[in-house]
Image (cartoon, grey):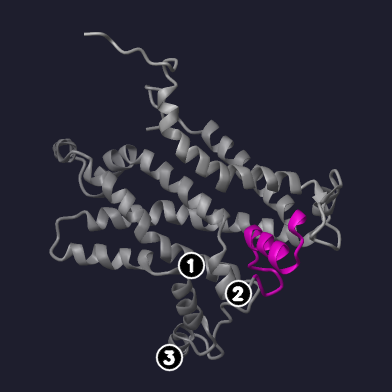
Amino acid sequence: MTKVRSVWPPGVTPYFFLLPALIILGLTVFGPALQAFYLSFTSYGYDLTQPPQWNNFENFRRLLGDQVFWQTLKNTLLYLVGVVPILAIAPLLLAILVNQKLKGVRWFRVAYYTPVVISMVVAGIAWQWLYAENGLFNQILRGLRLSQQGIPWLTSPDLALASVMAVTIWKGLGYYMVIYLAGLQAIPTSLYEAAAIDGSDGWKRHWDITIPLMRPYIFLVSVISAISATKVFEEVFIMTQGGPRNSSKTVVYYVYEQAFQSLEINYACTIGLVLFLIILGLSLLRLAFLPTSESGGYF
């Protein structure tokens, strides 16, 4: 039987299967990203219908003196520090809890996962009502006589950002719990039985077995939650609009504000480019300090 020779060099064929996806990514991701990079070094002036004018690093000089940008960058870093550790630890504890063979445990899994399927718009409005001056939280505080005036959850510069963080944490607990639950169910029960024979029982067995084997999942959740925290937008837009006094305004919201409210498209691209470089630097730093396995991989 005659063997048909391919007209393409070996190894080229798989790229033809990738070509449709690469074209779509090029049109929707890579192309706009390159255009945004170019716009970072230009300015439009007063007429947006005219081509942008090259202005070298003028947008970056403006950024260095922009106090609002530094405030939003600080808020974004606080959001990162405040949200990621909780979303890396609390869902794991929930996953260990709902992984037990208890009666009605499936209902608990559904209850913890329900916030994930709720739209952020609906969740933001609901939490805005809870945080209101006459909302449920302040009514409870008044009922317990802990605060007669109530707490200005969303109108205080000291509390607004933390109040929005609470919504992000509440919304993400169930999602990351499912990731951890998949990892827990992949751990052989024989390991726990052997640990019990060696005297490791209760929470100690989780410290000796569960945590070491779940490290890849903890790393995955940390990365995903960090990405979500740096690009948080819906919660801020719905609940606080970045106020009061920019205390809850994040970098992504500032990009939206400059691009679509002030029509400073070039300056918004500059802010986005700086945010991209910061995230890239943090990611490389995190990978540099991440211990690898003997096989050379992270998993």
Q: Give the quarter of the image for residue 30.
A: top right
The answer to whether residue 292 is visible is: no
Q: Give the quarter of the image for residue 33.
A: top right
Which residue is disc 2 drawn over?
Answer: 240
Percent of width and height locating residue 117: 36, 66
Q: Residue at x 54, y 66 (%)?
A: 234
Secondary element at image label 1: helix
Of labels 1 and 2, earlier in sequence is 1
Q: Taking 129 as reference, is 111 left or right? A: left
Which residue is disc 3 drawn over?
Answer: 143
Looking at the image, residue 270 lies above or below residue 5: below
Q: For marks 1 and 2, give the one nearer the viewer.
A: 2
The answer to whether residue 108 is visible is: yes
Secondary element at image label 2: loop
Q: Residues within 10 Å of mark 1 (few under 14, many from 20)?
A: some
Q: Report the span colored magenta.
A: 242-267
Q: For marks 3 and 2, give the one nearer the viewer.
A: 2
Q: For marks 1 and 3, give the one nearer the viewer.
A: 1
Mark 3 and 2 residues: CB-CB less than 8 Å, in contact?
A: no
Q: Which residue is drawn at 31% across and 13% down?
A: 4
Q: How crowded is mark 2: few (under 14 residues within 10 Å), some or many (20 or more)?
A: many
Mark 1–mark 3 Cα distance, whole angstroms, equals 22 Å
Looking at the image, residue 277 lies above or below residue 100: above
Amino acid type of disc 3? Gly
